[in-house]
Every structure is written in C-alpha cells, then in structure tokens.
Amino acid sequence: MNKFITAALALVIALAAAACAGKTPEGAGQTEVIVFAAASMTETLEEIAVLYAEAEPDVTLTFNFDSSGTLKTQIQAGAECDLFISAGQLQMNQLDIDAPGDINTDRLDFVDGETRIDLLENRVALAAPDGNPKNIGGFGDLPGIFAAGDTLMAMGNADVPVGQYTQRILAYLGLDEEELARNGRITYGSNVKEVTTQIKEASVDFGVIYCTDAYSAGLDIIDYATAGMCGQVVYPAAVLKTAANPEAAAAFLDFLTTDGAMAVFEAAGFSKP
C-alpha cells in the first residue's frame, strides 16, 4: 500500500513538473509599444515597422495615425500611448509641463522631457490634381486666383498643424480665410490625409498639404511655402510619462534616428531638422 502511495505521489510530482516546464516564464512574450503619430507619417512608419520587426522581433508596434490635434486630445483624455510624434510643436508643447504657461494653459504633464527630440522636418506644398487643370501657378498667385476665378481650395482644419500652417500662408498673402470660406472658396479636412484625398479625387482645384503626402499620393507639387510664409515645419517626438512600456518606446524612438530609418523618411520627402 505504501509503495502504491509513493508511486502515486511521484506521478503527481512528475506531472506538475511537466506542466511547469510547458509554461511561458513570467514577463516573456511580446512587448507592445503604442505610437500616436501624425497622419502624414502613415506610409513611412508602416515601412519602418517592417524593418523594426526584423531588429526587435519581440516588440509589437501599434500605430494610431490622425491629426496631431486629435491625438493630443486623445492623450489628454487618457488614451493609452507610449510615444507621441506630432506634426507641430504646438500640440507637443500643450502636453509638456516645461512649455510656457500661455501655450500649455492647462499645465498638462505628459511629456518625458528627457526623451523629447526634434525628429523630422517637412515642407508645406501647394498641390493640384493630376495635370493641374486650372493651371495654378504658385502661392504668390493665390490672391489673383481667388479674385478672378471660381476656384476651390482644400486645407486642414484650424486644430490641424497643416491647417495652421495654411492659415499663416493666407495671412502672409493678405487673404481673409473667413471671407473665402464664407464665399465657398475653401473646403476643409480633419487631417492632412483628408485634404490630400480631396486633391487626388479632383473635388477641389488645389490644396495645401505636406510635400510627403503629395509624393505618396502622386500629386503635382506646384510650389513650396517658404519659412517666411509659415515657419519651419518640425516634427517633435517624445515618450510619455504615462507610457506602459517607456523603455521599449525610447528604444523605438532611438531606432527612428538611425541611418536606415532616416533613409525611409528622406525617400518620402522628410529631412533632418
């Protein structure tokens, strides 16, 4: 009887050991990094993600692409995010406690300042549908174009960086945005991809987007805005203090500055700041 009990106990111990051996050790498996990035980075980041999967197969990248204003609002509302890449300094500053109080008016403290960098620079472009059917000449021609003909321009909303750059250009040219909109000469998009689609589909005569979006959509670039027209278009990036995986997020941000990742960005029209 004792021999039977001993054998039974041995079997139980062996089965338990086998079960433990088959378990994945605690902490092992995929690490998810949630990246909130400006919509204008969609194609490049998706391409870079393929490269990163080869370098770090244990890391899963989850992207949320939208206008920087929308992303900032989602972060402020508590959305899970490890890394934020904005198409404008304003939206990043509004989440950074180190930013001036007249910019970060709510004194939000989401940005890990030690990780914040200026990642990329883009260019604001005047683009037209295939063939430029209205023969739009350039930014300097817009006052005359609006005064002379029945043309329709697409631009981003006021809370979208590309829309804010466009507002500066219109002001620089002495054009009244409100009057143009009231007269049905402007249509809006909630992010740069929506504006790009309107141009691509020829539902407008021209629009203001980033050169990177024009490249990816195969659009005719008519002209580039100068820094005097709208300022420098810099994309800041930072790990958030609320990040679930800050170290993995910082590692991916470091990867974005490597020669391999920069080659992808530069092929799409981005440049180093």
Image (tube, rainbow, N blue to C red):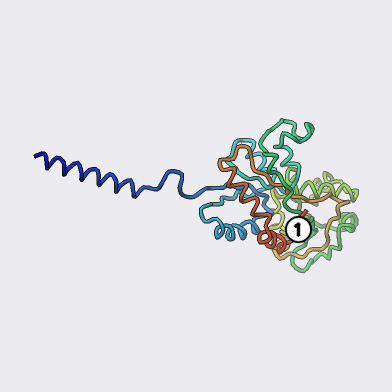
Query: Which residue appears at 83% of the width and 65% of the height?
Result: 135
Query: Which residue appears at 40% of the width and 48% of the height?
Result: 24
Residue 202 in view:
no
Position in image of residue 47 (x %, y %): 61, 60
Query: Residue lying furthest left in this view?
Result: 1
* Placement of 6 over or under 153, stated as above or below: above
Position in image of residue 141 (x %, y %): 89, 59
Q: Position of 243 compared to 217: left or right?
A: left
The three-letter code of the residue at mark 1 reads: Ser
Front residue of 204 and 225: 225
Position in image of residue 206 (x %, y %): 78, 59
Quarter containing the N terminus: top left
Which secondary structure lies at badge 1? loop
Query: Residue 98's quadrant in the figure?
Result: top right
Query: Residue lying furthest bottom in this view?
Result: 131
Residue 98 in view:
yes
Estimate how packed mark 1 is, as few (under 14), some (14 to 19) or many (20 or more) residues with alpha carbons within 10 Å. Answer: some
Query: Which residue appears at 59% of the width and 50% of the height?
Result: 63
Front residue of 151 and 52: 52
Front residue of 243 and 126: 243
Q: Position of 19 compared to 249: left or right?
A: left
Residue hosting label 1? 271
Badge count: 1
Position in image of residue 52 (x %, y %): 58, 57
Front residue of 42 and 208: 42
Q: Position of 183 compared to 203: left or right?
A: right
